[in-house]
Image (cartoon, grey):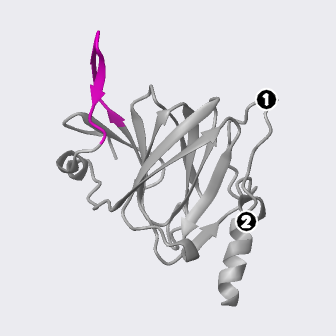
Amino acid sequence: MESITSGNFTFIPTDIDGVLVVESRSYGDSRGSFMETYKRPDFVAGGIDIEFVQDNQSSSVRGVLRGLHFQVNHPQAKLVRVIQGKVFDVAVDLREGSPTYGAWAGVTLSAESNRQFFIPRGFAHGFYVLSDTAVFAYKCDDVYHPNDEGGICWNDPGIGIEWPLLPDTDIILSEKDKHHPTLSELQDLRKVK
């Protein structure tokens, strides 16, 4: 698939079907800058025809790694961006029957890059903070269901994500994220049910 430009947006495919990097054109002068971050007709033309129903925002400090998270019965498509700082953002394909099942795509997002990352339903998602602080914002096409959380170990050797880990910086994980299974263990758990 080739890149598609519509309006102020360019939609760039990754190696995983449906996962896109979205670049936004920014306009600036001596006063500052302006850019559109979402415009439904342009996103539909770019291949993203979904309705977003919830916006979220989080802040994190250097070395924080959040993920890899997914919703089990209520999967969410996400359009993610960084409005302050810099992160490495990752999507892992969990779509059963997908030719890229277990593969990952990653992109560096920053406030200056004018990039967003579109992650369809059926993916685990996570990010690692590369700057002193980062503010991360994202749109979802389904509301969050707290009792529907799932996760995969961030450093699962079977997935092999190449995180750009910062030297002399400890990785900061939530207690929950420290105990996620690998993808292989997750598959085994699903077979038991």
Q: Amino acid at mark 2?
A: His
Q: Indicate whether residue 46 is drawn in magenta.
A: no
Q: Is residue 76 visible?
A: yes
Mark 1 secondary-structure assignment = loop
Disc 2 packing (10 Å; few <14; some 14–19; many ≥20): some
- Total labels: the figure holds 2
Residue assigned mark 2: 180
Q: Residue sitting at 20 percent across and 49 percent down? A: 45
Chief secondary structure of the magenta portion: strand
In which image quadrant can residue 167 be found? top right
Which region shows up in magenta? 23-37
* Left or right: 143, with 106 as reference point: left
Circles 2 and 1 in contact, beta carbons < 8 Å? no
Q: Residue sitting at 65 percent across and 37 percent down? A: 61
In which image quadrant can residue 4 be found? top left
Rendered image: mark on residue 68: none
In the foreground, 40 or 48: 40
In the foreground, 170 or 91: 170
Residue assigned mark 1: 167
Q: Residue 177: horizontal and vertical position, in percent?
A: 71, 59
